[in-house]
Image: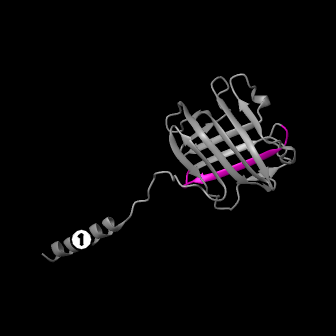
Amino acid sequence: MKSRKLFLVGFAVLALTLTNCKKESTTPTTTEPTGDYIRCKVNGVLHTFDKAGSGGNISNYDDNYEGSPNRKVIQMARLEGLMDVFTIDIFKDLDLLKVPQTLSYGANTSIDNYEFMITYIQSFKSYMSIYNEEKSNSSITITSKTNDVIKGTFKGTYYGINLNTFDLDSVKITDGEFRVKVVRKSLVP
């Protein structure tokens, strides 16, 4: 009898604890972002990437980056939640960047001549604007650059491998826009 009462009291405490927990909303924000952000619709669903990484800034300009076709990269990255990351790499000299300027990548673009790369990582899926040369199409327009704050728009269909199934997968990106301040600092210490 005593163990039955103890069980009921324990169950009641557990039930109260669980019912008082508030579930975090997974619905993307629709308010205007402040500060640095990358925002777009992924397959029709609005996402706002407006958080920096745990180490602080993750948006840099490196004028001696070996991973770039011309050793220069403007890298803008923001997070949404813990696992979703959006990165825009523009392989241009920040000081010589012309605005407005539209860059595009399509079926006729050689992998050796790309001027930008957009990467979207969603949990265990990774999509890139340059992953599938035959099918990828994307564009980015840099609309302004003031004091190393870069603004612009982007769209495209990005391909990648679903790491759960190892199948080719794609996402359609529309209504993309960004505002990010870059720091002049090497990506590799």
**Residue 123 can be seen in this image:** no
Q: Position of residue 164 (x, y in %)?
A: 50, 38
Residue 63 covered by magenta stretch: no
Q: Quadrant of residue 41?
A: top right
The amino acid marked with disc number 1 is Ala
Measuring 19% from the left and 71% from the top, which residue is drawn there? 8
Q: Which residues are magenta?
A: 70-83
For the view shown, which residue lies furthest in the left direction? 1
Name the image colouring.
Answer: one colour
Q: Position of residue 30 (x, y in %)?
A: 52, 52
Q: Is residue 23 left or right of residue 31?
A: left
**Secondary structure at numbered mark 1:** helix
Give the total of numbered labels: 1
Instruction: State the residue position of label 1.
Output: 12
Measuring 74% from the left and 42% from the top, which residue is drawn there? 142
For the view shown, which residue lies furthest in the bottom direction? 2
Q: Position of residue 72 (x, y in %)?
A: 83, 44
Residue 24 vertical placement versus 14 (above, below): above
Residue 83 vertical placement versus 116 (above, below): below
Residue 118 vertical placement versus 149 (above, below): above
Image quarter (top left, top right, bottom left or bottom right) of the C terminus = bottom right
- Local packing at callout 1 (Cα closer than 10 Å; few below 14, some 14-19, many 20+) is few
Q: Is residue 168 left or right of residue 3?
A: right
Measuring 62% from the left and 33% from the top, which residue is drawn there? 156
**Pick the front one: 158 or 177:** 177
Q: Quadrant of residue 136?
A: top right
Measuring 32% from the left and 69% from the top, which residue is drawn there? 17
